[in-house]
């Protein structure tokens, strides 16, 4: 029984672990600079969140009446998809101000770690 390294290749475990740590730290620092807020659901200038719940509530009503109703399940799942898509579509993502040095350090850690992970998955020449 032979021991193989990262990705089934000989060696590279140390590079993989080092790259993983660098990528996780860089990714965490980068994501820590991001602020996420939500906005109002607007359709033709009016708040439209309530209208997006209509198919969902109609599906719930039909399923309480008949739990095997195909139309009820379709409305419920379709309404749920509309609500999830609406939440995602109305998110506002901001990168908080930081220095160029900090931004470069975050990106070097993240992409340097990804590079080391990719390098560790190649066969190592002895």
Image (cartoon, rainbow, N blue to C red):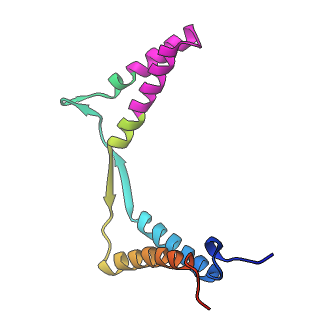
Q: Residue furthest left?
A: 44
Q: Determine the residue positioned at 65% across, 72% down.
A: 8
Identify the image quadrant of the C terminus.
bottom right
Give left or right: position of 61 versus 36. right
Give left or right: position of 64 versus 10. left
Rendered position, 70 above or below 95: above
Q: Residue furthest bottom?
A: 126
The stretch in magenta equals: 54-83
Rendered position, 27 above or below 68: below
Q: Quadrant of residue 87?
A: top left
Give left or right: position of 54 versus 7. left
Q: Determine the residue positioned at 48% across, 67% down.
A: 28
Q: Determine the residue positioned at 51% across, 20% down.
A: 73
Q: Determine the residue positioned at 46% across, 21% down.
A: 74
70 within the magenta span: yes
Q: Which SS type dominates the magenta stretch?
A: helix
77 within the magenta span: yes
Nearer the observer, 34 or 20 = 20
Identify the image quadrant of the N terminus.
bottom right
Residue 63 drawn at (x, y percent) = 54, 14
Nearer the observer, 93 or 62 = 62
Residue 108 drawn at (x, y percent) = 41, 79
């Amino acid at each position: 029984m032979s021991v193989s390294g990262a990705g089934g290749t000989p060696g590279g475990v140390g590079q993989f672990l080092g790259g993983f740590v660098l990528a996780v730290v860089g990714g965490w620092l980068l994501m820590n600079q991001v602020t996420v807020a939500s906005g109002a659901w607007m359709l033709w200038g009016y708040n439209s969140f309530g209208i997006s719940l209509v198919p969902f509530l109609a599906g719930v009503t039909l399923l309480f009446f008949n739990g095997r109703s195909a139309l009820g399940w379709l409305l419920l799942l379709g309404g749920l998809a509309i609500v999830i898509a609406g939440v995602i579509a109305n998110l506002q993502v901001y990168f908080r101000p930081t220095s160029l040095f900090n931004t470069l350090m975050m990106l070097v850690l993240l992409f340097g770690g990804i590079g080391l992970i990719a390098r560790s998955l190649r066969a190592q020449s002895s």
